Amino acid sequence: MPYADLTGLTARIGEETLIELSDRASPPAGGVDAALADADALIDGYLATSYTLPLSASQTLVVTLAEAITIYKLYTFAAPERAESDYRDAIKSLEKIAEGKIKLTAAGAEPSSSGGSGVKSCDRKPEMTRNNMGAFI
């Protein structure tokens, strides 16, 4: 399931800009789909370290990051400062998600277990003597 779609991109940057970036008379699904797939792969690479993929629920933050990455990738040559800044911010946010500094909380975005929690057991019985029982005796 792609994180962003053509409708969201059109709402974010406008149909005219999307047509200019894709160099077509109307926003083509094919040219934009390749940029969307690149953004999804990049996001999955960061999320795979902490989350079970694919995410079953739409995450507003992830959709926003996917749109910023896709828009940046649609620029063939030099991207405007705003698109480049949004892209850098998206990468920083993905790094924070991977480090656990930003958590995704909706259903389907549970962090994968590290196996570090659970029951701790000891293989020996504790000795009960006058010295270690202190005030109890």
Image (tube, grey):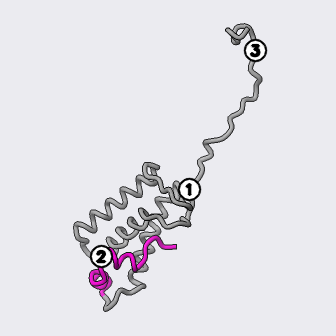
Q: Earlier in the sequence, mark 2 or mark 3?
A: 2
Q: Which residues are the magenta region?
A: 1-23
Element assignment for label 3: loop
Q: Relative to the observer, which residue lies in front, 22 or 4?
A: 4
Task: Measure the alpha-carbon separation of dots 3 and 1.
Answer: 44 Å
Element assignment for label 2: helix
Residue assigned mark 3? 128
Going by the image, does 73 lie left or right of 48? Answer: left
Task: Give the residue type that dot 1 points to.
Answer: Glu
Element assignment for label 1: loop
Residue assigned mark 2? 13
Task: Give the residue type that dot 3 points to.
Answer: Met
Asked whether disc 2 touches disc 1, contact meaning CB atoms under 8 Å apart, the reply is no
Task: Measure the alpha-carbon separation of dots 2 and 3.
Answer: 73 Å
Q: Identify the residue at image location x=45%, y=74%.
A: 37
Coordinates of residue 134 in the picture (x, y in percent): 68, 9
Please identify the quadrant where the C terminus is shown: top right
Q: Identify the residue at image location x=51%, y=59%.
A: 106
Q: Say which quarter of the image contains residue 53.
A: bottom right
Task: Give the residue type that dot 2 points to.
Answer: Ile
Coordinates of residue 5 in the picture (x, y in percent): 43, 77
Q: Please tell me how crowded label 3 is: few (under 14), some (14-19), or many (20+) other residues with Cα within 10 Å.
A: few
Q: Earlier in the sequence, mark 3 or mark 1?
A: 1
Coordinates of residue 10 in the picture (x, y in percent): 34, 79
Q: Is residue 4 above or below residue 47?
A: below
Q: Is residue 19 above or below residue 103?
A: below
Residue assigned mark 1? 110
Q: Identify the residue at image location x=36%, y=68%.
A: 69
Asked whether disc 3 touches disc 1, contact meaning CB atoms under 8 Å apart, the reply is no
Q: Earlier in the sequence, mark 2 or mark 1?
A: 2
